[in-house]
Image (cartoon, helix red, strand yellow):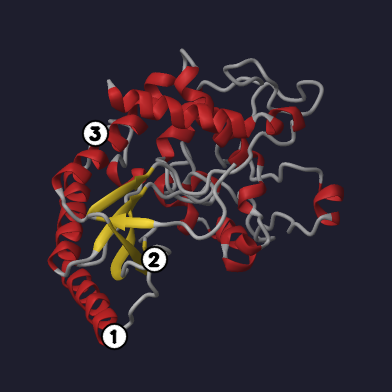
Amino acid sequence: GEPKGPKVFKLEGQEIVLFGGNYVMKARPYFPPLDVVVADAQRLAQELKLSAYRPPPAKDGSPRRAVCCVRLGAMMEGAMPDEAMKLDEQWAANLEATIKAFADAGVYVFLDVHQDAYCTTNGGDGLPWWMAAEMQRTAGCCTPSGECLCCCCCCGSPNPSYLTSPEHPLKLMLPWCIAKCIGMRQIETDPEDQDPWRNFSVGGQAGHPGLMNIGNINMRLNNHDAAWAEGTVGATRQCHNFATRFHESPFSERDREPLFEPYLQHIRYLCRAWERHWNVVAVELLNEPFLAGLPNVLQMMVSRRRLFDFHLATLEGLER
């Protein structure tokens, strides 16, 4: 099992205590203006210095020191914004400049491949919208491993939803009678909007799908702070189907090239940044992945193992 007690971090052989916070901008341009980053980095370092805080000694009595560190967002939707699957040069330049600004102030960073509900077309953020479009284009009632995405015992639909559109309205993963009993919010739409899921949808010709999470007013009714707190967006069929298929993508003949390989390319780029910059201390492969697969309970029960397999495939891919 996991060792009990506080986690120990060392830098150059000395135990350290990390101070800092999140620095994740979840929408374009994904990084604040450089002068803002410089000011934030300098302020963080200065305030820790002025605090005169001295951590208690390590268990062996040796001194520990406090170190500034931020969790820096490195979102794939910003790095590869369109289906060309090419690194966006402006995003890369902004990432490099942001890392350097923190380095100049003596602040360490770890790079966070952030996601919330995986994709803008689910009402979330993180992975590119074109991944959801590819999943929908090649949709079938079963995952690449052959398991049903529709229900616990049989296929209720030959075309499960991986994104939100007029043909695939945002829908909870559980029947409302069950969802209500466990305190989930019902999906809301503007009663005066006769076509609530067209704006900013894939193929809707009414706004860029990369902005659906903030541009579609009906999506905003379901992904505001209170809705997030009650788990609405993360509890949709779109989100669960997307997560299940993405976690299986390294092992799928159909999905490895269009889904997993671009993700692996993104991770490789971040690892190269780790090699280039002394202050980059880690790369977080995927923020807060969850147990996916509902309403298929059997699918959900093996989702944790598949997530571990996904991470293993990522590490193996980095070795090649």
Whether residue 41 sits left or right of residue 190 in the image: it is left
Q: Earlier in the sequence, mark 1 or mark 2?
A: 1
Q: Secondary structure at mark 3?
A: loop
Q: Which residue is mark 1?
A: 52
Q: Closer to the observer: label 1 or label 2?
A: 2
Q: Residue at (37%, 71%) from the top-left corner? A: 57
Query: Residue 205: which disc?
Result: none
Crowding around mark 1 (Cα neighbors within 10 Å: few <14, some 14 to 19, many 20+) is few
- Residue 292 against residue 14 in the figure, above or below: above
Q: Residue at (33%, 82%) from the top-left corner? A: 53
Q: CA distance from mark 1 to mark 3?
A: 46 Å
Q: Which residue is mark 2?
A: 58
- Residue 120 against residue 27 in the figure, above or below: above
Q: Position of residue 150 (x, y in %)?
A: 72, 28
- Residue 107 against residue 305 in the figure, above or below: below
The kind of residue on which mark 2 rests is: Ala
Q: Which residue is mark 3?
A: 86
Q: Secondary structure at mark 2?
A: loop
Q: Residue at (69%, 60%) from the top-left corner? A: 191
